[in-house]
Amino acid sequence: MTSAQAAASLGWERPRVSHIESGRHGVSGERVRHLAAHYSARDTAYVDALAKMADDHTKGWWTAYKDVLPPTMLDISEMEHHAVYLQSMQMLAVPGLLQTPDYARSIFVNGSCQLSPNLIEQHIEHRMARRRVLSGTNPTPFTAVVHEAGLRMRYGSRDIVRSQLRHLLEVQDNPSVTIRVVPFDIDAFHGYAQSLLHVGGPVPQLDTIQIDNAYSIDFLSADLQLAQCRALIERASAAALTPAQSNDFIHKVIQEL
């Protein structure tokens, strides 16, 4: 069905449909179902999930940062807020959702983008606020696969890193959080150098992969991209220690710092 045909079926002007399809305009859940019917969409779970998202007009806490932080940072917060589950794979640092303020500050200070002290503090405040998805009455299940290099990398002082690793041990007591370590003595696996965040949607088609690059943040959602990243996380998980072994390993790293 063309955009002109879709517009005619809804009694709209053609540009309105184009704006909705491109994400420039919102749409109600009822209209989503109407469009899905006209597009002959037969995946009921997918349509239901889209309609629910369209009807959610809750103003998220992250909107308070819309005039301060890049839109991609707010997108991450919103995706985490709506996620059914989260999976992180980090090679050179502790995942953002598990970072302490001092550790995060060291990362921002030494990052590839030079930020003002005030903006750095705004980034830290926002990052700490993101952690709320891991607590409360309905915490989001979060699995973090972290390479040993990410535990030993010196961000700031030894004390900052030790404090960060102790925080990981404390977080392990949260039943919604699972931390697994990939030690140095494990053979490299295909894609091992990549760091990413897998945001699980209410249906697989709404999953998103977030990848950090040196100067940008990319979001992947194509079927092939999702399949490749899911396979990468599976390989990393297969190479990682169990949660209990990882807990002991983190204790060991703290003692060696």
Image (spheres, rainbow, N blue to C red):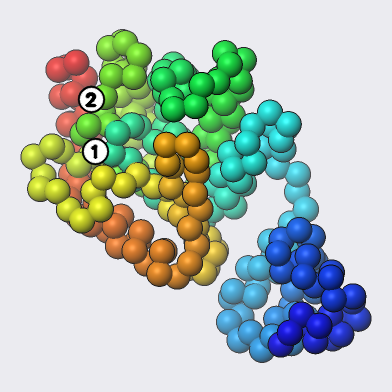
208 with respect to 25 (left or right): left
The residue carrying mark 1 is: 147
Judge whether residue 112 can be spotted in this image.
Answer: yes
In this view, 69 is above or below 138: above
Residue type highlighted by circle 2:
Arg
Mark 2: secondary structure: helix
Nearer to me, 213 or 231? 213
Locate residue 225, reporting x and y percent: 41, 64
Q: Residue at x 78, y 65 (%)?
A: 19
Label 1, secondary structure: give it.
Answer: strand
Closer to the camera, 129 or 152? 152
The residue at 55%/20% (across/down) is 115
Give the image location of residue 76, x and y in percent.
56, 44
Which quadrant of the rendered structure holds the C terminus? top left
Residue type of the residue flagged with mark 1? His
Quarter holding residue 157: top left
Image height check: is 229 above or below 172?
below
- With 102 as the anchor, is 52 left or right in this view? right
Q: Residue at x 35, y 44 (%)?
A: 195
- The mark nearer the N terminus, 1 or 2, is 1
Left or right side of 172 for 141 = right
Callout 2 crowding tier (Cα within 10 Å): few <14, some 14–19, many ≥20: many
Label number found at residue 152: 2
Q: Is residue 134 above or below residue 254?
A: below
- Please, is residue 55 above or below residue 5 in the view? above
Q: Position of residue 230 (x, y in %)?
A: 35, 61
